[in-house]
């Protein structure tokens, strides 16, 4: 029986790897998701075949509860809230690993090998801090916790001392597994460490933190797998941990920042003043607000258009009307494409998911590195709610906190149309030089209503 179970685990691992491969492209992402679902289903089924299971009652209850929560979340959670849901699911993964390790540690008459005890302790530490860190990330995304960095004097010293305390307690438990006081101390301090590690991180860095916490949850699962000698948990945890870490690296590269800077730099404090609908200053002069009819005239006469979506599009739930506008322009002979920055939105792939929900063709979606050279040959660019990822200060202003960050070169286009509710700064808390350029037209208002009005004006 154990040979059959391990064979199914191996098959599941292959499906997980294929799923990850397919998830690397928007065109095959749905197939990747389905393969991963089949792999997880097989892994669960194989686990239930384990002859060591005495009763299925609690297992079935757990499956039922998880199924209901997952189904409700999939049906009812809006795409704009997907980052929050991912953060919560990361936390659930960490909590599950910690609870399994906790139950295993307290099991009657359990004898641990040295390696098994080490992995069990690591599972509790990483799982616990992943849980509370993910809850704080959820709170920042949801607005329940201030999105700005929460800092205080000596913060990093305090965190280092807490981490040292966890390590000391881990050594004590390793030497004396019967010391439950120290073990529960590890749990409590790890939970605190998760909170303190995430509160100094600003909203601009949430895509990176979500990826990192996802990696942490995978590491916790893998550690639990080693402690339980469960091959499925080891493989799944390793895949999640590695892929999350690679994605974290990609996110950091997209912002031209190190992971250490993200974790300890308190970026995006929002200290820059927010303006109103008009502003002056900067290298380009004054912001110029335009009417819907002016923008419609530009789109009417454009031969090519690149749409740059950002979180503002998600917040306004404008993805469907954006697709309607682009479909109409394509019918009029305009070449339409979408430019996706790696950190646009609040989680990796956020814009891709939103546009996929609106049935935008995958062929029209282009990554930053594939389309950046095309802006100079484009008649019009429509920026919808994006801010820091299109700010020319990243190229021109060495004193800017985003200097050196790769951006979409939208300012090179003949005309740039920016849909924005107000002159409030983005997550980085700095003024956007793009808004002051001579070739920029600002259309203020709710993104969804603005796009709807543009479409009506074009059809008149």
Image (cartoon, rainbow, N blue to C red):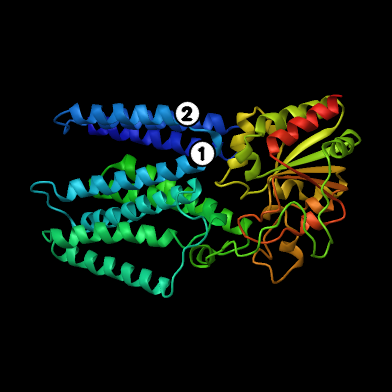
Q: Is residue 417 left or right of residue 63?
A: right
Q: Measured from the top left, where is residue 185 in percent x and y?
A: 21, 61
Q: Which residue is mark 1?
A: 82
Residue at point 54% right, 66% down? 261
Q: Quadrant of the N terminus?
A: top left
Camera-nearest residue between 281 and 315: 281
Q: Residue furthest right?
A: 301
Question: Which comes before the other along the chain, label 2 or label 1?
Answer: 2
Residue at point 83% right, 51% down? 288
Camera-nearest residue between 445 and 262: 445
Label 2 and label 1: CA atoms lie apart by 11 Å
The answer to whether residue 49 of the structure is visible from this angle is: no
Q: Which residue is mark 2?
A: 76
**Secondary structure of residue under mark 2:** helix
Characterize the local packing of mark 2: few (<14), some (14-19) or many (20 or more) Cα atoms within 10 angstroms.
few
Q: Is residue 355 left or right of residue 191?
A: right
Mark 2, mark 1: which one is toward the viewer?
2
Q: Measured from the top left, where is residue 294 in percent x and y?
A: 87, 39
**Secondary structure of residue under mark 1:** helix
């Amino acid at each position: 029986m154990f040979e059959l179970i391990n064979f199914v685990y191996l098959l599941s691992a292959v499906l997980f790897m294929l799923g990850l491969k397919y998830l690397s492209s928007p065109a095959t992402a749905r197939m990747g998701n389905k393969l991963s679902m089949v792999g997880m289903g097989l892994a669960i089924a194989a686990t239930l075949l384990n002859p060591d299971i005495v009763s299925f009652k609690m297992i079935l209850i757990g499956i039922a509860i998880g199924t209901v929560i997952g189904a409700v979340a999939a049906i009812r959670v809006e795409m704009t809230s997907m980052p929050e849901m991912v953060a919560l699911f990361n936390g659930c993964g960490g909590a599950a690993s910690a609870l399994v390790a906790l139950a295993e540690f307290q099991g009657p008459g359990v004898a641990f090998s040295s390696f098994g005890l080490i992995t069990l302790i690591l599972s509790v530490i990483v799982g616990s801090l992943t849980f509370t860190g993910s809850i704080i990330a959820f709170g920042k995304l949801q607005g329940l916790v201030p999105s700005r960095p929460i800092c205080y004097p000596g913060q990093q010293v305090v965190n280092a001392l807490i981490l040292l305390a966890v390590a000391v307690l881990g050594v004590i438990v390793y030497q004396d597994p019967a010391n439950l006081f120290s073990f529960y101390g590890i749990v409590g301090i790890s939970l605190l460490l998760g909170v303190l590690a995430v509160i100094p991180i600003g909203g601009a860095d949430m895509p990176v933190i979500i990826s990192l916490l996802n990696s942490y949850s995978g590491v916790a699962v893998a550690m639990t797998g080693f402690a339980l000698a469960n091959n499925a948990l080891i493989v799944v945890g390793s895949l999640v941990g590695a892929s999350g870490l690679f994605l974290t690296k990609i996110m950091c590269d997209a912002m031209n920042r190190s992971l250490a800077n993200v974790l300890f730099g308190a970026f995006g404090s929002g200290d820059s003043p927010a303006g109103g609908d008009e502003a002056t200053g900067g290298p380009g002069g004054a912001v110029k607000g335009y009417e819907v009819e002016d923008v419609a005239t530009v789109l009417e006469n454009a031969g090519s258009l690149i749409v740059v979506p950002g979180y503002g599009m998600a917040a306004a739930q404008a993805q469907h009307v954006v697709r309607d506008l682009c479909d109409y322009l394509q019918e009029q002979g305009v070449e339409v494409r979408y430019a996706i920055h790696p950190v646009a939105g609040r989680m990796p792939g956020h814009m891709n998911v939103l546009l996929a929900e609106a049935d935008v063709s995958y062929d029209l979606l282009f990554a930053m590195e594939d389309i950046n050279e095309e802006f100079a040959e484009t008649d019009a660019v429509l920026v919808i709610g994006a801010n820091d990822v299109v700010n020319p200060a990243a190229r021109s202003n060495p004193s800017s906190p985003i200097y050196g960050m790769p951006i979409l070169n939208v300012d090179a286009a003949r005309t740039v149309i920016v849909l924005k509710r107000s002159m409030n700064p983005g997550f980085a808390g700095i003024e956007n030089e793009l808004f002051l350029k001579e070739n920029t037209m600002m259309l203020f208002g709710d993104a969804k209503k603005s796009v709807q009005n543009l479409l009506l004006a074009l059809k008149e």
